[in-house]
């Protein structure tokens, strides 16, 4: 994300422009000043304090490790970083940056999430039933993504919502739980989500709801 995906500067649809233009595609490689470990079956297969972070267009960042930091796990050479190899994320059971476990992919140092109180209007309805209409919102401004509005549950007709079994994980916000809407006997799946235990940077949106642009009729002044 951030540099190389979405509307990031090296993504396919950048929000801004370089002057003068830079070559495309371009790969950015930089030092990653954290100890990185990968564990498979209880055994440490990767352990490095000389990790590089590789940013490729359209992809989340990838780790590149010195060859001597990798043992007993599949790896492939990184052309842009001679002497370094890439280990697929799925090749290990657990990944750690320092002593913090990381899920999904390496954290991107250029990805930022700001949660800002706002008076922007949010209106959402499902099958003609109004779920929320308020200007008391929190705007979530996330690098390379369009802004989204969150609201407290007190402002939502939660009697029309039922918990969904769907969950998703975001390295920058945490694990999201989803909610479906039950209107006139019809259940519309996953119309909203919430982060009940977000990462520290996103504590302002704890337990707040955001509505799906795909599964609900949403108007956001964002």
Image (cartoon, rainbow, N blue to C red):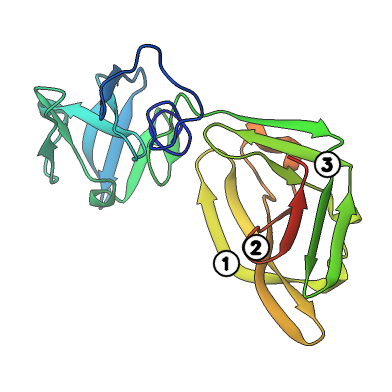
Number of residue marks: 3
Quarter holding the C terminus? Answer: top right
Asked whether, in this view, residue 99 is left or right of residue 35, the answer is right
Which numbered disc flags the more N-terminal residue, 1 or 3?
3
Name the spot of residue 3 as percent of width and height, x first: 41, 28
Residue that extends furthest to the top in the rendered view of this protein: 20
Query: In which image quadrant can residue 10 be found?
Result: top left
Rendered-image quadrant of the N terminus: top left
Q: Is residue 177 above or below residue 97?
A: below
Q: Does the rendering let one see residue 209?
A: no
Q: Write the residue at 37% across / 38% down.
A: 60
Mark 2 or mark 1: which comes first in sequence? 1
State the CA–CA distance, disc 3 to disc 2.
19 Å
Q: Nearer the viewer, residue 49 or 6?
A: 6
Q: Could you tell me if the residues under marks 1 and 3 are in contact, i.e. CB atoms within 8 Å?
A: no
Asked whether the beta carbons under mark 2 and mark 1 sit within 8 Å of each other, the answer is yes
What distance separates the C-alpha of mark 2 from that of mark 1?
A: 6 Å
Binning the other alpha carbons within 10 Å of mark 1 as few (below 14), some (14 to 19) or many (20 upward) gives few
Callout in the foreground (3, 2): 3
**Residue 34 visible in this rendered orientation of the protein:** yes
Q: Which residue is mark 3?
A: 137
Of tags 1 and 3, the one toward the viewer is 3
Task: Classify mark 2: residues with Cα within 10 Å, few (<14), some (14-19) or many (20+).
Answer: many
Callout 3 crowding tier (Cα within 10 Å): few <14, some 14–19, many ≥20: many
What residue is rendered at 74% in x and 57% in y? 218
Residue 166's disc is: 1
**Cα distance in 3D space between marks 1 and 3:** 24 Å
Percent of width and height locating residue 158: 85, 66
Task: Specify the label residue 178 is tagged with.
Answer: 2
Q: Is residue 171 left or right of residue 117?
A: left
Say what secondary structure mark 3 lies in. strand
Image coordinates for residue 146, horizontal then vertical, percent: 60, 40
């Amino acid at each position: 994300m951030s540099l190389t995906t979405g509307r990031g500067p090296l993504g396919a649809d950048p929000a801004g422009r370089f002057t003068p233009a830079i070559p495309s595609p371009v790969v950015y490689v930089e030092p990653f000043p954290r100890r990185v470990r990968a564990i498979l079956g209880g055994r440490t297969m990767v352990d490095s304090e000389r990790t590089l972070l590789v940013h490729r267009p359209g992809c989340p960042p990838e780790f590149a490790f010195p060859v001597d930091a990798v043992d007993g796990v599949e790896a492939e050479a990184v052309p842009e970083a001679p002497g370094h190899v890439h280990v697929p994320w799925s090749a290990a059971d657990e990944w750690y940056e320092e002593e913090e476990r990381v899920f999904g992919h390496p954290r991107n140092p250029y990805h930022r999430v700001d949660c800002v109180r706002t008076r922007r209007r949010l209106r959402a309805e499902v099958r003609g039933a109004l779920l929320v209409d308020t200007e008391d919102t929190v705007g979530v401004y996330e690098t390379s993504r369009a802004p989204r509005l969150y609201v407290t549950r007190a402002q939502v007709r939660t009697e029309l919502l039922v918990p969904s079994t769907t969950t998703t994980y975001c390295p920058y916000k945490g694990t999201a739980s989803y909610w479906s809407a039950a209107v006139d006997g019809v259940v519309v799946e996953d119309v909203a989500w919430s982060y009940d235990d977000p990462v520290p940077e996103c504590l302002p949106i704890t337990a707040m709801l955001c509505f799906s642009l795909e599964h609900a009729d949403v108007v956001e002044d964002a």
